[in-house]
Image: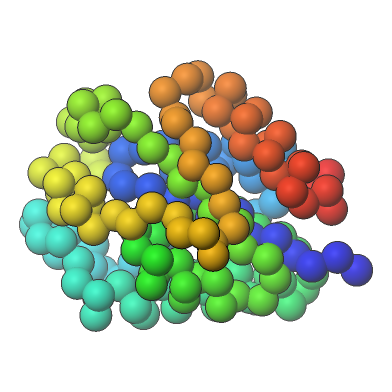
Amino acid sequence: MSRPVHVVVMGVAGTGKTTIGHGVAQRFGLEMAEGDDFHSEANKAKMAEGHPLTDDDRWPWLGSLRDWMTGHADEGRSTVVACSALREGYRDVLREADGDVFFVHLVLPEDVNADRLAARKGHYMKSGMLDSQLATLEPLSEVEDGVEVLNTGKPEEVVAEINQALSLRFPQLD
């Protein structure tokens, strides 16, 4: 049996993690976790008030995502996770999951990102938080398995680009 693969669609708020993650999950028939759903109520309230999360706020959240991924891997199932995963240290926690962890870092020009966040309705993550997220963001390092993808095209085109990379890297997904 091949090792399960966990595709972590990452990036700052507003880059399209959920939309793209759903497209990837649908293509490969995988279950998807929305990282925001794993935040505690206290974390959600803090962000809704415009306060950035601290590392102490993030560690339990990241651990719960890692454990969800491992639970699926224990059943031989691959997954997709939409999660900001802004720092390498945060991604290190996710890489502790059983199976192979592959990061898809979605990026946007800052003005496009700000416009997308401003257009959002009903999300606790406010557009004013973008600056703190960009300041926190660390690009993928050489030791991290993943790709950076510009998400300015149509969602189906971006998903197709990612799916092609995944099919080449992890043929067991097809």
Q: Is residue 150 left or right of residue 170?
A: left
The quadrant of the image that shows the C terminus is top right
Q: Is residue 72 visible?
A: yes
Q: Is residue 125 visible?
A: no
Write down the quadrant of residue 89 in the picture: bottom left
Q: Position of residue 14 (x, y in %)?
A: 31, 38
Q: Is residue 170 left or right of residue 8?
A: right
Question: What residue is shown at x 30% (from left), y 45% (from top)?
Answer: 13
Which residue is situated farthest in the top direction here?
154
Q: Position of residue 148 (x, y in %)?
A: 49, 42
The correct choice, above or below, for 87 with respect to 169 in the image is below
Write down the quadrant of residue 99 in the picture: bottom right
Question: What residue is shown at x 46% (from left), y 46% (from top)?
Answer: 105
The correct choice, above or below, for 141 with respect to 167 in the image is below
Question: What residue is shown at x 40% (from left), y 66% (from top)?
Answer: 88
The quadrant of the image that shows the N terminus is bottom right
Q: Position of residue 170 (x, y in %)?
A: 77, 51
Q: Is residue 52 left or right of residue 21?
A: left
Q: Position of residue 138 (x, y in %)?
A: 33, 57
Q: Could you say which is closer to the camera, residue 106 or residue 88? A: 88
The correct choice, above or below, for 104 with respect to 99 in the image is above
